[in-house]
Amino acid sequence: MYELRGVTKRYTRGKDTVHALDGVDLTIGDGDRLVIQGPTGGGKSTLLQMLGGLDRPSSGEVVLDGVDLAKLPEARLTRVRSENIGFVFQSFNLIPTLTAQENVETALVPLGVKTKERRERAAEALRSVGLGERLGHLPSEMSGGQQQRVAIARALVKQPKVLLADEPTGNLDEGMRDEIMEVLERMWKEYGLTFIMVTHDSSIARKAPRVATIRKGKISVKENTGG
């Protein structure tokens, strides 16, 4: 699925050059579940952005299904993201003036899905995350955990191959964290997704089959017998 070869990302900060990623090599197979950990500023979110085609490396290759995302024209890269990659973020990123169903439908608009099918697929996606009775609710009328379920439904409604999650439980209490992780793990299994998640939460990392740790732009990966 993914093959990263010599991926480097450099930023200029004043007179200094920061190596957010420094020669990262990483293989992620179809259907893998990988947790990414490391200190703040160590390169975790930068790596996730590379995997999602949201940013390009300074050098190296980010190959997804044989295609180097780093070399794609912007229009084609946008298409790959729209069709193949679902994103879930810590801050939910829901549109406050749209209902839960309308928020989920937004993921299907770039794919040219007709209105009737969009509505049906959005409703089904919300039912799959336990929000079948909340289709017409605005984000302000839902708890944080419910809003994150909407965000998960939005990520999955387009039936992507990859789900990327950046601190998806970071704004939730422990009970909501466990609920959201149960939903994400169930979706991973049911959809056969490749699931890659950044988290500071060691209790989540202990349950993952593989854990990648990034420090100062360098990566190490271990198999987790507890996953």
Image: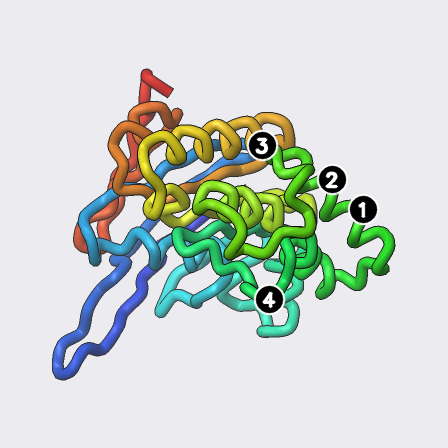
> Which residue: 64% across, 46% down?
160
Horizontally, residue 13 falls left or right of residue 91, namely: left
Horizontally, residue 135 falls left or right of residue 68, namely: right
Q: Residue at label 3?
A: 187
Q: Residue at label 1?
A: 120
Q: Residues within 10 Å of mark 4 (few under 14, many from 20)?
A: few
Q: Residues within 10 Å of mark 1 (few under 14, many from 20)?
A: few
Q: Residues within 10 Å of mark 2 (few under 14, many from 20)?
A: some
In the rendered image, which quarter is residue 11 located in? Answer: bottom left
User: In front: mark 1 or mark 3?
Assistant: 1
SS state under label 1: helix
Q: Earlier in the sequence, mark 3 or mark 4?
A: 4
C-alpha span from label 3 to label 4:
27 Å
SS state under label 2: helix
User: Toward the viewer: 148 or 21?
Assistant: 148
Kindly identify the amino acid type of the residue bearing the numbered disc 2: Glu
Please indicate, yes or no, whether residue 2 appears anywhere in the rendered image.
no
> Which residue: 46% across, 35% down?
180
Kindly identify the amino acid type of the residue bearing the numbered disc 4: Thr
Please indicate, yes or no, whether residue 44 appears anywhere in the rendered image.
yes
CB within 8 Å, label 3 to label 4: no
Kindly identify the amino acid type of the residue bearing the numbered disc 3: Met
x, y percent for residue 100: 63, 52
CB within 8 Å, label 2 to label 1: yes
In the rendered image, which quarter is residue 131 located in? Answer: top right
Residue 97 - label: 4
Kindly identify the amino acid type of the residue bearing the numbered disc 1: Glu
Q: Residue at label 2?
A: 124
